Image (cartoon, grey):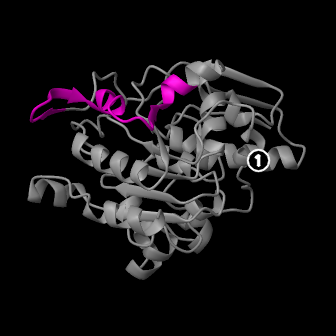
Amino acid sequence: MIIDVRPEFGYDLVCAAPYAYWLHQQGKLEKIITCKGMQPFYYFCNNVEERYTNRSINNDTNGVQNLPNNWIHHNAMALKGKAYNELTYDEQVEVNGVLDYKQWIAPPYKDVYHDKTINVPEKYIVISNRYNKEHGDEPIGYFDIESLYYMFDYFTSIGYNVIYKRPMNTEFATDENEWQSSGIVADVEGHGVISDFDLVNRFDNVYLLDDIIKEIGDDYNISQLKIFARSSGFVSMGGGSSILCSYFKVPVIIYVNTSKDIRPGYFEGDSYFHKLSNAPIHPIVDTKENIIARGYKDYTNVYNKIKEVFK
């Protein structure tokens, strides 16, 4: 079997890689054709061609249409024998976030990439941020300077180091929602305008993921997987980054506001989030509509969950 895909990153991790790994386990995987930088996620295949320099959000043409699970948010047809819009509300809640797992095994990234030889801080939390367009709209789903300051300060005060990830979207193949940006900024009284990267430099025990990757000196995604494999936990925005964090068997707090992940029941029961590594998943939903109505993002529940999970 040849798998040929170039979807959004999350689809690669949820729909393509577990199917490919299942095929590998069955001795049926011949080749992977994928996006630039994805070989480390398909480490189990000896024939990986990184053909594509860009991803596509068009699921009718990007390859996922040929996979057993061609929609990341549910597989109603396989589970209930009916289209999603034919289900009752209770049935929709039951299938939200649930896939057909008959040909699906999540690759064991934590076991494969756990490397005690790399130079990383002891006992660290990875905070995975983003700053992307959201289906044509300006960014709304991201951790701002104030929330990052709170998290950096809290984690370092209780003995954790922090590794901060916020891609510039030059590190890997991008889709139509991802763009190169100058940074997340705020005008802080007494300090002037600072960026999220400037904020990292103001804490002794907070490190930029990109700097550690440079020290490791390996491929971006190989290094990232090795760093994630030794993390004590994650705080992530929703989307593909939260999916990757959920592969590593440690607690993940996810701030969700724009994706279909906000659907009721999405993170419960047989959700693929639990199937990736059986990591404890803690979603905090703050919808885009609520953010617009109140005029700001409310991270209160994120902070409370952080204090509950990480002590």
Q: Quadrant of residue 217?
A: top right
| Left or right, residue 280 beside residue 275 | left
Amino acid under disc 1: Asp
Q: Between 94 and 181, which is closer to the camera in this rendering?
A: 181
Instruction: Return the x and y of residue 151 as percentages of the image width and height.
Output: 35, 50
Q: Which residue range is magenta in the image?
A: 186-212
The quarter of the picture where the N terminus appears is: top right
Can you give x and y, in whole percent of width and height, for residue 37 in the image?
A: 61, 24
Q: Is 242 placed above or below 218 here?
A: below
Residue 172 visible from this viewpoint: no
Q: At 57% from the left edge and 53% from the top edge, which residue is drawn?
A: 246
Can residue 246 be seen here? Answer: yes
171 or 158, which lies in front? 158
Residue beneath the point at 45% across and 38% down: 205
Residue 30 horizontal side relative to residue 203, left or right: right
Q: Residue at x 62, y 51 (%)?
A: 247
Image quadrant assignment for residue 218: top right
Determine the residue positioned at 74% across, 38% down.
116
Q: Secondary structure at mark 1?
A: helix
Image side of residue 186 versus residue 221, left or right: left
Residue 219 in the image: above or below residue 305: above
Mark 1 surroundings: few (<14), some (14-19) or many (≥20) residues within 10 A? few
Relative horizontal placement of residue 139, taking residue 270 as reference (left or right): left
In this rendering, the answer to whether 215 lies above or below 256 is above
Q: Which residue is mark 1?
A: 111
Identity of the residue furthest to the right in this view: 27
From the top left corner, tell me how far across and down residue 48 is, in percent. Answer: 75, 25
> Is residue 207 a member of the stretch shown in magenta?
yes
